[in-house]
Image (tube, rainbow, N blue to C red):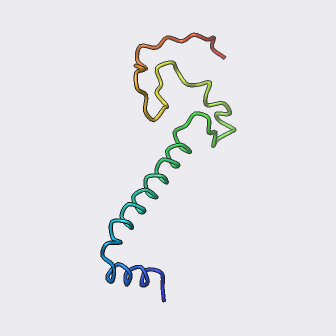
């Protein structure tokens, strides 16, 4: 028997398991999307070493790369360090 057949039979026999499968599937989907966002949008990750070996040096002071910030307005930040 295939896995989907076993899961389908369990859900028909025990309908109370449907929310469990929905929440586990939703949590898995959200965690995979967050991992993909970290891999693609985080400045610490470098996929192209030839054209841009240090992507964190190209960020400006107003670039927002955090997922969620509570009280920082990135448009009003000033650069403190020198350009490299």
Q: Which residue is more in the foreground, 50 or 81?
A: 81
Q: Quadrant of residue 53?
A: top right
Residue 40 drawn at (x, y percent): 53, 43
Q: Which residue is more in the foreground, 55 or 77?
A: 77
Task: Tell how many labels.
Answer: 0
Residue 63 drawn at (x, y percent): 47, 25
Q: Residue at x 33, y 83 (%)?
A: 13
Residue 68 drawn at (x, y percent): 43, 33
Q: Is residue 23 left or right of residue 37?
A: left
Q: Residue at x 43, y 20 (%)?
A: 74
Residue 81 drawn at (x, y percent): 61, 11
Q: Quadrant of residue 76?
A: top left
Image quadrant in which the C terminus is located: top right
Q: Is residue 56 left or right of residue 73?
A: right
Q: Is residue 51 left or right of residue 24?
A: right
* Residue 49 drawn above or below residue 5: above
Q: Quadrant of residue 70?
A: top left
Q: Which residue is more in the foreground, 27 or 34?
A: 27
Q: Residue at x 30, y 76 (%)?
A: 15
* Residue 46 drawn above or below residue 16: above
Q: Residue at x 49, y 31 (%)?
A: 65
* Residue 62 drawn above or below residue 7: above
Farthest residue to the bottom: give it: 1
């Amino acid at each position: 028997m295939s896995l989907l057949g076993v899961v389908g039979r369990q859900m028909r026999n025990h309908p109370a398991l449907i929310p469990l499968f929905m929440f586990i599937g939703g949590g898995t989907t959200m965690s995979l999307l967050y991992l993909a966002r970290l891999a693609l949008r985080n400045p610490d990750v470098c996929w192209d070493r030839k054209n841009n070996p240090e992507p964190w040096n190209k960020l400006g002071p107003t670039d927002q790369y955090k997922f969620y910030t509570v009280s920082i307005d990135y448009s009003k930040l000033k650069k403190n360090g020198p350009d490299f």
